[in-house]
Amino acid sequence: MRMKVKVTQSCIDRFNEWDRKSVRGHGYRLNCLVAQAVRELFPNAGVGFHIIDTHIEGMEFVDRIIDLPHTVTEQIRLLDARRVTGYKPVPFEFEIDVTMKIIDSISIGQAYKVLSESPTLEFICP
């Protein structure tokens, strides 16, 4: 299933609020802009440099990850260096491929409901 992920100003605001209060680097995987954007569908999601880890209970790591496009890994790299460079994120969008194994584990009906109502996630028709 192809999905569009929208990192909105609201995601950026939540990230900035967390960043102001956080101990440097602590909890970044769970509070990254991308994790904020996918949280409605994957409530425990964390982000590594190249992946979204959906943290779906009972699934093997290899089955629960979603690869991130290069443009997003570049955004993450810029965010990682933000305290030195002064980089300020702006809203952006990207597409991901979510396996049916992941979708089935959260119920396809629930997935479509979230995707139809979410300001940060959108189903892309094949």
Image: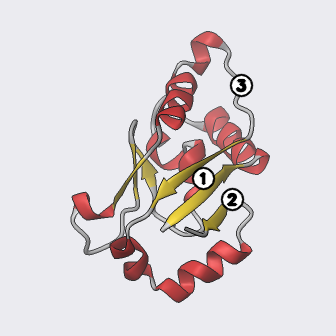
Q: At label 1, which amino acid type do we have?
A: Gln
Tell me: residue 6, above or below residue 112. Answer: above
| Badge 3 or badge 2: first in the primary sequence | 3
Q: From the viewer's perspective, is 8 left or right of 18?
A: right
The residue under label 1 is 36
Q: From the viewer's perspective, is 107 left or right of 3?
A: left
Tell me: residue 17, above or below residue 65. Answer: above
Q: Are the residues tagged 1 and 3 within 8 Å (C-beta)?
A: no
3 or 2: mark nearer the eye: 2
What residue sits 57% from the left and 27% below the top? 79
What residue sits 76% from the left and 50% below the top? 10
Question: How far is mark 1 from mark 2, CA to CA?
Answer: 9 Å
Of helix, strand and loop, which one carries label 1? Answer: helix
Figure quadrant of the C terminus = bottom right
Q: Residue 118: horizontal and vertical position, in percent?
A: 70, 69
1 or 2: mark nearer the eye: 2
Of 18 and 50, the residue lying toward us = 50
Mark carried by residue 88: 3
The residue under label 2 is 120
| Badge 1 or badge 2: first in the primary sequence | 1
| Badge 1 or badge 3: first in the primary sequence | 1
What residue sits 47% from the left and 41% below the top? 69
Quadrant assignment, res 82 = top right
Mark carried by residue 60: none
Question: How far is mark 1 from mark 3, CA to CA?
Answer: 16 Å
Of helix, strand and loop, which one carries label 3? Answer: loop
Total numbered labels placed on residues in the image = 3
Q: Residue 124: horizontal and vertical position, in percent?
A: 61, 65
Question: How far is mark 3 from mark 2, CA to CA?
Answer: 19 Å
What residue sits 67% from the left and 19% below the top? 87
Q: At label 2, which amino acid type do we have?
A: Thr
